[in-house]
Amino acid sequence: MSRWQVIDGLQIAIDGPSGSGKGTIAALVGAELALPVLDTGLLYRYIGWRAAEQGVSLDDENAVLSMLDRAIASMLWKPQGIFLKEADVEKDCTSQLRDENAGARASQVAAMPQVRAALLGVQRDIAKMGCIMDGRDIGTVVLPDAQAKFFLTASQRERARRRWSQLKAKGEDADLERIAAELKARDARDKDRDCAPLEKAVDVIHIDSTTMRMDDVVDRILNILERRKLIKKL
């Protein structure tokens, strides 16, 4: 049971570059407040994954659009992850969406203006009842009226180290220099794309977590929410 009371329909937007810790922080804050956490990056990973499964080229936006409705219809997006619904059977495909290839495909999908527009309604509908949503354009595009917006970042080297540590913990081979190079390329794509580039909302609170522990970041966010009277202790 949460020790916090949350205002009705509270929407918390957490943005930031890859590896900034936004997914971890969103999950920790969500657990504290008993709010569902929705990772929008997972949605783009899912579309890229389905496209790859069906042999659809990610260089062809029209081809991706043509399979989008079917992909969304067979998807269940839950706080626990994304599930594939086929023949009344739900299959958790979240782990498949967390690998490096899925991340690269997501970056390509996220650069497609028409695909982003189609997925915008899906994200907003799910957020109506209140949630924590993390991604790269939540505070600027998806939930511009969110009551609280945070932008998490960390040095590029530290973000690469965190990703390297995650992969090693899973028993996967990981090369820190390769991860750092891929992260740098992805940062450039996310910042320079024409459609919804990674940027801070004007009313965002910026938190640099390079030298912070995750629980310290969570405490700072909770303190801000409490001061704003968006949550209160029970």
Image (tube, rainbow, N blue to C red):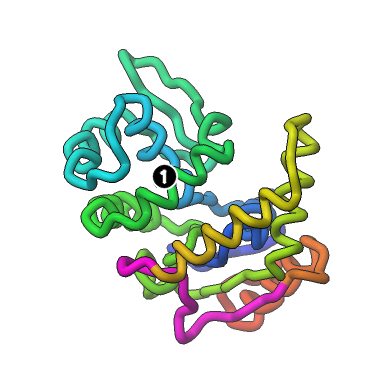
Is 204 placed above or below 113 here? below
Q: Residues within 10 Å of mark 1 (few under 14, many from 20)?
A: many
Segment colored magenta: 193-208
| Residue at the (31%, 69%) spot, across then down | 194
Give the secondary structure at mark 1: helix
Identify the image quadrant of residue 69. Answer: top left
Question: Which sits in the foreground, 125 or 190?
Answer: 190
Overall secondary structure of the magenta stretch? Answer: loop
Amino acid at circle 1: Leu
- Closest to the observer, 106 or 149: 106
Find out whether residue 196 is within the magenta segment.
yes
Q: Could you tell me residue 225's position as x and y percent?
A: 62, 75
User: In the rendered view, would you say 44 is above or below 170?
Assistant: below
**Residue found 17% across the figure and 37% down from its top:** 66
Please tell me which residue is depicted at 74% across the width and 44% down the height of the picture: 175
Rendering coords of residue 50 (x, y %): 36, 31
Residue 138 position, x and y percent, is 43, 65
Q: Is residue 101 visible?
A: yes
In-front residue for pair 131/191: 191
Image-based side of 233 in relation to 105, left or right: right
Quadrant of the rendered image containing residue 231: bottom right
Report whether residue 32 is seen.
no
Is 23 in front, or is 125?
Answer: 23
For the C terminus, the quadrant is bottom right
Q: Which residue is mark 1?
A: 43
Q: Is residue 175 magenta?
A: no
